[in-house]
Amino acid sequence: MALYAGTGVSRQTQDAEVAGREAARAALSNAGIETADVALVVSSVAFDQAGLIKGIADVLGKTPFVGCTGAGAITGSGVHEGAVAVLALKSDEAKFIPVKVTNIKADMHGAGKRFATELQSAGGGDIKIALIFSDALSGNGTELVRGILETMGTRFPLGGGAAGDDLHFEKTYQFYNGEVLSDAVVGLGVGGNIETAVEADHGWQPIGMARIATKASGTKLFELDGKPAFSMYEDYFGARSADFKKALSLAAVSYPLGMKVKGREELMIRAPLGIGEDGSITCGAEIVEGSEIYLMIGTLSSVLWSAQETARGVVGNFSGKGKKVMFVSDCVARKILLGSRGMEEINLLKTIGGPECVIFGFYSYGQIAPLRTQVEDVHMCDPGFYEQSISLAVFGS
């Protein structure tokens, strides 16, 4: 199978249409093609989104494309802030199926099922992997992915992540061909003669003893051991606990929560995004009542180690020697923790991926990856929606 893939980037925020055209032209040129079968787009919310998408469409013509805004774009050349990045794809054997579902806030679980149904219908049962770009601000991403897996099957490989807005937490955008959407999930199904592999990991470690989530609902944790949830931070950090009340402050990034549910050993990371007056903690993903909750710690070395091991795992499960794409959904919390050393993480991915690997992705508000091997029930809390993790999806020949 011949797979052509190339990326293009523009930071021309003064003129969004120009930026869109620059990035799309560069992607086609770097892929060595005149027209693409499909394209992926990630951008900053700093752009006029309508103008940006128009510029991309002017260059791509009838080529379909999907994507979203994020908290930074990722390509093999580095971390790109205030930028738009385009990945152009063409293949003589793979097929690419773009899908969208709108108005997801009203029923995230139902939106996931609708997405899967659309994917199955358009793909004719030949979809090997799906990349997802969802609106994290619409609600519980766990329920969205749960709905998809209930329809597609628990072992169906999902990659991608939740859209961002450069840490404003106000409004994210999803792209579907010439449309600029919000409160939507868009995606790309890939089928045909391709090989795929997807994995995710985080690298955070627990501190001290577990507490029990005695009261929780959806993404909100109300009580730990019968006390207001935020008391955990007050007990550990005293007056410094006020530093944790700002969403994704360096303190909150370095010391998130870890959740352990019955039936699995690995701790799932939950980022504290908001603290209520009642001491409740709102996280970006589902909290299971009765689960064990730990305080976690992350370091630069642990974050880089997790990226390295995830890349080794995903490439190790990929036997193809030809051109491949590594799609990266990396948590914005990891970006904050890495700071100026973000390129070190990308260099690790490049080294492990090899010269035939094209790297593309974004810093996200939630990461999507397959269920862990020990979890087969999507009604348990490991439906493949993670926080403060790195998700890598590889596909190619």
Image: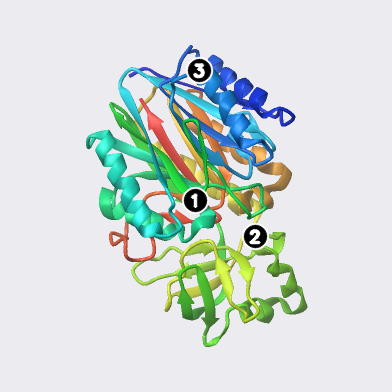
Image location (x, y in percent) of residue 224: 53, 81
Q: Is residue 317 visible?
A: no
The image shows residue 135, relative to residue 126, as above or below, that is: below
- Residue marked by disc 1: 183
- Residue marked by disc 2: 253
Q: Residues within 10 Å of mark 3 (few under 14, many from 20)?
A: many
Image location (x, y in percent) of residue 79: 65, 36
Q: Is residue 179 left or right of residue 97?
A: right
The image shows residue 163, relative to residue 272, as above or below, that is: above
The colour scheme of the drawn protein is: rainbow
Give the label, 2 or 1, closer to the camera: 1
Q: Residues within 10 Å of mark 1 (few under 14, many from 20)?
A: many
Q: Which mark is residue 31?
A: 3
**Disc 3/disc 2 C-alpha distance (Å):** 36 Å
The image shows residue 142, relative to residue 216, as above or below, that is: above
The image shows residue 343, relative to residue 281, as above or below, that is: above
